[in-house]
Image (spheres, rainbow, N blue to C red):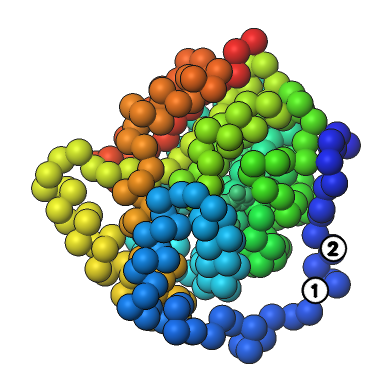
Amino acid sequence: MWRVQLRLIVLPPPSTFRPMTLTDLPRPTSTSAGAPDDALEVRDAASGGAAKREYVKRIFSEIAPRYDLLNHLLSFNIDRGWRARALDALGWRRAPEGRYLDLCAGTLDVSAQLSRLDGFKGSVLGADFAEPMLRSGRGKSSEQVVRPVVADALALPLADASMDGAIVAFGIRNVADLDACLHEVHRVLRPGARFVILEFSTPRSAIVRTGYQAYFHHVLPTIGGLVSGHRSAYKYLPESVKHFPEQRALAERMQRTGFAQVSWTDLTFGVAAIHVGEKAS
Ligand SMILES: C[S@@+](CC[C@H](N)C(=O)[O-])C[C@H]1O[C@@H](n2cnc3c(N)ncnc32)[C@H](O)[C@@H]1O
């Protein structure tokens, strides 16, 4: 049983959902289609503050039906391997029957991947505040093992020290208050449990950085905009990476929160990185 502290909102069984039709797909609006004034909105949201929470919730809710397709397309499927490496770092084999948190779970890729690993006998709580993202991910795994929950990463409906590990993939950069989120994850972990962060970063090599920035700032918003009808969302992505702390700074913030044994590994020339920290026993 999940021990809950606040109200736990678990989605109803799939049979109660209205089937998704083409008319459910987001229609491009003047903002979502990339009107000139969205540059300001994107910059404001990426730099944090009050606007960020609502902006992030809205864009992910709107792009949810196209999220998986674009994710794998725009990352040339490399994201799957990155998620597998992040799950390795979680150390779930130390407690294969444990309870794990997939934070900012989106369409539940990480949750599903964890639930399918050979020897995993535990359960996963997939928490995200954008319900359409969780809905899009339904059916990827058994709901006996993976439970989607509509919840904010800054106020998790979980008891203190109730989780055997937590992981967040490409999510923490989107949270309006990074330090508050680190504290919240630290609160819900058992002593000795690990927190793994998989996130984009800016490559250090000038050559790689040039190619990466051309791709991130031009190719990605164009393809993302065309396929999802939401250019603003795909312009937000590189902006948000720009405002996210680089690897050493993130590690220091994890340490300041109380995580021990903090380390990180760069992935694919530093385009992404995995950070790992342990709640001190
Ligand atoms: C880029 S997606 C990542 C989804 C998934 N983890 C993956 O690997 O594909 C980021 C997700 O973070 C969620 N998110 C952002 N801020 C959040 C918050 N404060 N609380 C809960 N979810 C949040 C968004 O709704 C979105 O689904």
In the image, 247 versus 94, the foreground residue is 247
Q: Secondary structure at mark 1?
A: loop
In the image, 37 versus 68, the foreground residue is 37
> Up-down: is 54 above or below 246?
below
Q: Is residue 272 left or right of residue 119?
A: left
Residue 21 location, quadrant? bottom right
> Up-down: is 114 above or below 54?
above
| Residue 279 rendering spot, x and y as whole percentages | 60, 19
Residue at the outermost top position = 281
Residue 107 location, quadrant? bottom right
Q: Which residue is mark 2?
A: 12
Amino acid carrying mark 2 in the image: Pro
| Residue 71 rendering spot, x and y as whole percentages | 45, 62
- Image quarter where the C terminus lies is top right
> Up-down: is 126 above or below 62?
above
Amino acid carrying mark 1 in the image: Phe
Residue 26 location, quadrant? bottom right
Residue found at x 84% / y 41%: 6
Q: Give the CA separation, mark 2 to mark 1.
A: 8 Å
Q: Which residue is mark 1?
A: 17
| Residue 232 rendering spot, x and y as whole percentages | 41, 71
Classify mark 2 as within 8 Å of ligand 1 or not, answering yes or no.
no
Q: Is residue 223 left or right of residue 160?
A: left
In the image, 51 versus 270, the foreground residue is 51
Residue found at x 42% / y 35%: 274
Q: Secondary structure at mark 2?
A: loop
Residue 13 seen in the current view? yes
